């Protein structure tokens, strides 16, 4: 649930698929993995669109053309079209995708979504796209939540990221359970109850901010 406040402006360009006009985040008929991750469909790398999706967030990179983020996928301008790409290592981003897994390497968390790894960089107070750690030494953190969270009032991705982070931080403070730490940072004997308490606190906070939580 970690996500940081996003100060980037939102891009209001509607996206259409350049090859067949289909919606960018609707799975095509018969679509199968590897473009699914934790039950979420991502458009495959190399797919082209006339523009980035509505609500995509432009992220600057070394003074060049920005990369556009939307719903866990990345887009970059290439000639006449926008192409689904992998973000470059070193790209600084103010939030995490909504569907991610947490992996641990050497006591340090890596956040993974859609074939991209992110790490938290305290010196810039943002996340950074990073190289994957050695896979043989990865351990997977328990899922932070089995909750389904839906914005009831059309909240933007940046506002959703802010709300999720702030509610996560509040729930951690209330319960002492932090889902991005191994075993939630609590003793195994109290893990089930603490995780349930965290989910309940998180749901209460998000509901109060206008989200449907199930």
Image: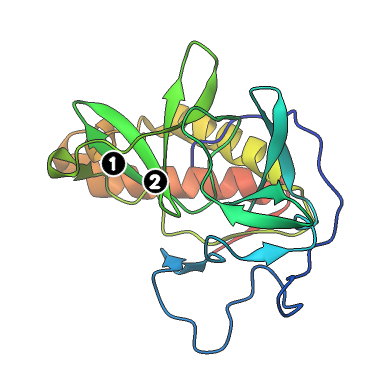
Query: Which residue lies under the disc numbered 1?
Result: 103
Image spot of residue 44 (x, y percent): 52, 65
Q: Is residue 58 left or right of residue 41?
A: right
Foreground pick, 28 / 147: 28
- Residue 180 visible within the image: no
Q: Position of residue 57 (x, y in %)?
A: 73, 42
The answer to whether residue 189 is visible is yes
Depicted 181 relative to depicted 138: above or below:
above
Q: Residue lying furthest front in this view?
A: 79
Image quadrant assignment for residue 164? top right
Residue drawn at (60%, 57%), measured in percent from left and top?
A: 84
Residue drawn at the location 44% of the way across and 25% of the way down: 120
Location of the C terminus (image quadrant)? bottom right
Q: What percent of the width, then of the height, locates residue 209?
A: 71, 45
Residue at image coords 48%, 42% = 1
Residue bearing mark 2: 112
């Amino acid at each position: 649930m970690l996500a940081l406040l996003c100060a980037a402006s939102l891009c209001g360009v509607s996206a259409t698929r350049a090859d067949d006009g289909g919606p960018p985040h609707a799975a095509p008929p018969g679509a199968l993995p590897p473009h699914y991750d934790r039950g979420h469909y991502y458009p495959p790398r190399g797919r082209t669109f006339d523009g980035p999706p509505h609500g995509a967030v432009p992220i600057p990179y070394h003074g060049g053309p920005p990369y556009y983020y939307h719903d866990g996928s990345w887009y970059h301008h290439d000639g006449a079209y926008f192409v689904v790409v992998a973000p470059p290592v070193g790209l600084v981003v103010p939030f995490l995708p909504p569907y991610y897994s947490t992996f641990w390497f050497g006591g340090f968390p890596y956040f993974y979504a859609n074939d991209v790894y992110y790490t938290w960089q305290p010196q810039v107070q943002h996340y950074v796209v990073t190289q994957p750690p050695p896979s043989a030494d990865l351990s997977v953190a328990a899922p932070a939540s089995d909750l389904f969270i839906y914005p009831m009032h059309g909240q933007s991705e940046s506002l959703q990221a802010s709300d999720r982070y702030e509610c996560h931080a509040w729930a951690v403070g209330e319960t002492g359970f932090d889902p991005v730490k191994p075993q939630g940072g609590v003793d195994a004997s109290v893990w089930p109850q603490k995780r349930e308490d965290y989910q309940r606190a998180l749901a209460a906070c998000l509901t109060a901010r206008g989200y449907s939580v199930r």
